[in-house]
Amino acid sequence: MLLELKQLRIQPGQQLLLEDVSWLQLESILRELGNKRAARLSYSNGRLEIMVPLPEHEKAKEIIGDIVKILLTELGINHDSLGSTTLKNERMSQAVEPDACFYIQNQGAVIGKKRLDLNIDPPPDLIIEIDLTSRTQLTNYQILGVPELWRYDDQGLQINVLQNGEYIKSASSLIFPTIPIVDLVNQYVEQSQFVGGSQALRAFRTWLQEYL
């Protein structure tokens, strides 16, 4: 007797790994799980990981995502935030749901679109992944051609930029080259743990307005 996906229970902070999953099976799993769920998926060449994040993961994701939104707004940069939308490219056999993603330079290509298909649409310009309870695999994003990936873990923020199809660590952001992103993200994420998220974000906005 075959188990149905709805019978499985994945606890927060844990992962489920499935091998030899076809693209048709992946599409069926995505339909069964639906859009309103805590679980996130990563699929590459038949290997599917399903992860349910812990609250600490979500807090860091929200703070860092809001920092990016404040930066883009204060700098007057047009953008769209697509959150954890599923990024799929059947031809490349890749699908992944980031913690957060932003269309910036490529915003014009996705305005008004209700669904993304990376067979024809460009990838996001910026991906954010929180690695407090799991480890992000870079393969998905490298193959999909995402130019910039931020990873936040217990050691702080790491910026990865795509060069010749591979990610290299960078001290600065391609999108915010004059802003000390690593120091700022580390400072205000840590501050949010003591004073609260909204208070830390207000402090960051004040700093940025003075800096600019």
Image (spheres, grey):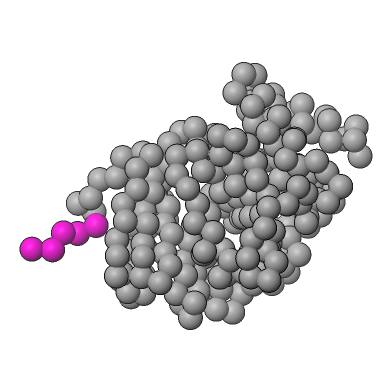
Decide if residue 22 is in sight here: yes
Q: What percent of the width, then of the height, locates residue 200?
A: 70, 26
3 vs 9, left or right, is left
Q: Residue at x 50, y 52 (%)?
A: 136
152 vs 24, left or right, is right
Q: Nearer the viewer, residue 68 or 48?
A: 48
Q: What percent of the width, then of the height, locates residue 54?
A: 43, 36
Residue at the farthest top position: 194
Q: To which quarter of the image does residue 174 belong?
A: bottom right
Q: Is residue 132 above or below residue 172?
A: above
Q: Is residue 135 above or below residue 33?
A: above
Q: Is residue 20 above or below residue 184?
A: below
Q: What percent of the width, then of the height, locates residue 193?
A: 59, 23
Location of the C terminus (image quadrant): top right
Q: How many marks?
A: 0
Q: What percent of the width, then of the height, locates residue 147?
A: 68, 63
137 vs 14, left or right, is right
Location of the N terminus (image quadrant): bottom left
Q: Residue at x 83, y 51 (%)?
A: 177
Q: Is residue 36 above or below residue 180?
A: below
* Residue stretch in magenta: 1-5
Q: Is 4 included in the stretch rendered in magenta? A: yes
Most prominent secondary structure in the magenta stretch? loop
Q: Residue at x 68, y 64 (%)?
A: 162
Decide if residue 84 is in sight here: no
Q: Is 32 included in the stretch rendered in magenta? A: no
Q: To which quarter of the image does residue 152 belong?
A: top right
Q: Residue at x 64, y 61 (%)?
A: 167
